[in-house]
């Protein structure tokens, strides 16, 4: 793994008024458990996981909101086959209220969508920072779970979006480029946001057990090169594997939720297991 990452990454203040956060900034008590779903590399199935995980958690009786925090290249609307009249762009510019931007999605959960190609929002300006922070503060108390579908990588916008969450779920595939970028993202979360642990799900796993082995390999690298504030290594928690499954591509091409259209296929069952693990390890422990 390339360990030259931190020297090229700018440092940021930890306050909501700063360019990005050194540590999670949601500190006020609220009912919702906020989980950032992110990745080091694009194209690993992050939005697929966000949407289908939301459906699986909703099926378990939770009130779920998915916020499309990939402001530059949003595609949650494509995955869900939605054509919103109001997006975050309209909210940011004052053309519409936040209430109008919250819409129902297939699967029974709610979404707030971002328009694709929002170049002016691909940088972390004070306006973007303030709007995102206020949106989370306003909406989170209404839900049990808020999933932040962030962009990929370690840009200021991505890191600020992640800083709004109590927990981080990194999506990676077994490909070397994905794992290298996942390590880079996790390292930044440890050094800049002072996170003690990050959760990992391995998508497109070829064989049972691949994800646990990959988690172990990444943990070894983290143990060697990354130390948290406490002086202990960053803890990487394996949350599960989603197997390579042709049903996923079929659902994506049809713009349908896998959990609804093919709930018995291997990938859908794996997402259900992921939802169960999140429920038992995060949601019930927060009650």
Image (cartoon, helix red, strand yellow):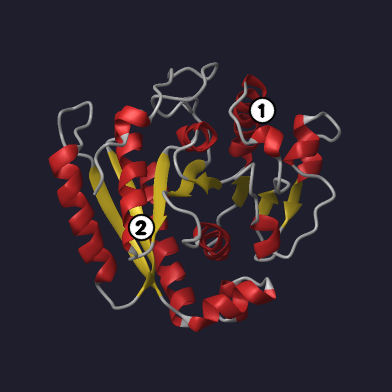
Label 2 Cα neighbours within 10 Å, binned few <14 / some 14-19 / many ≥20: some
Quarter holding the C terminus is top left
**Quarter residue 108 falls in:** bottom right
Residue 177, numbered circle: 2
- Residue under the point 81% across and 34% down: 97
Label 1 Cα neighbours within 10 Å, binned few <14 / some 14-19 / many ≥20: some
- Residue under the point 30% across and 39% down: 187
Residue 195 seen in render: no
Residue 123 seen in render: yes
Residue 131, numbered circle: 1
Q: Secondary structure at mark 2?
A: helix
Question: Does residue 18 sit above or below 176 in this rendering?
Answer: above
Q: Secondary structure at mark 1?
A: helix
Comparing 230 with 219, the one in front is 219
Q: Tag 1 or tag 2, which sits nearer the N-term?
A: 1
Comparing 147 with 283, the one in front is 147
- Residue under the point 65% across and 75% down: 253
Q: For this view, does 275 lie left or right of residue 157? A: left
Distance from Cα at disc 2 to Cα at disc 1: 33 Å
């Amino acid at each position: 793994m390339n360990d030259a990452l931190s020297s090229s990454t700018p440092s940021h203040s930890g306050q909501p008024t700063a360019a990005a956060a050194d540590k999670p900034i949601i500190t006020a008590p609220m009912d919702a458990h906020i989980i950032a779903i992110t990745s080091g590399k694009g194209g690993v199935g992050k939005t697929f996981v966000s949407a289908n995980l939301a459906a699986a958690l909703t099926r378990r009786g939770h009130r779920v909101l998915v916020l499309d925090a990939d402001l530059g290249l949003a595609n949650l609307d494509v995955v869900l086959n939605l054509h919103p009249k109001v997006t975050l762009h309209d909210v940011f510019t004052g053309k519409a209220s936040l209430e109008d931007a919250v819409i129902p999605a297939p699967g029974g959960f709610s979404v707030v969508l971002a328009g694709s190609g929002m170049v002016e929002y691909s940088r972390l300006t004070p306006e973007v920072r303030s709007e995102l922070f206020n949106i989370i503060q306003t909406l989170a108390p209404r839900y049990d779970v808020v999933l932040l579908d962030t962009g990929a990588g370690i840009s200021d916008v991505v890191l600020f979006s992640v800083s709004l969450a109590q927990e981080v779920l990194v999506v990676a595939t077994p490909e070397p480029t994905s794992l290298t970028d996942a390590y880079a993202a996790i390292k930044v979360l440890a050094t800049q946001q002072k996170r003690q642990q990050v959760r990992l799900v391995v998508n497109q796993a070829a064989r049972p057990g691949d994800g646990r082995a990959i988690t172990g390999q990444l943990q070894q690298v983290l143990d060697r090169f990354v130390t948290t504030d406490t002086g202990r290594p960053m803890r990487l928690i394996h949350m599960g594997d989603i197997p390579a499954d042709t049903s996923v591509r079929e659902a994506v091409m049809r713009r349908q939720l896998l959990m609804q259209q093919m709930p018995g296929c291997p990938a859908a069952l794996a997402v259900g297991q992921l939802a169960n693990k999140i429920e038992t390890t995060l949601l019930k422990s927060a009650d």
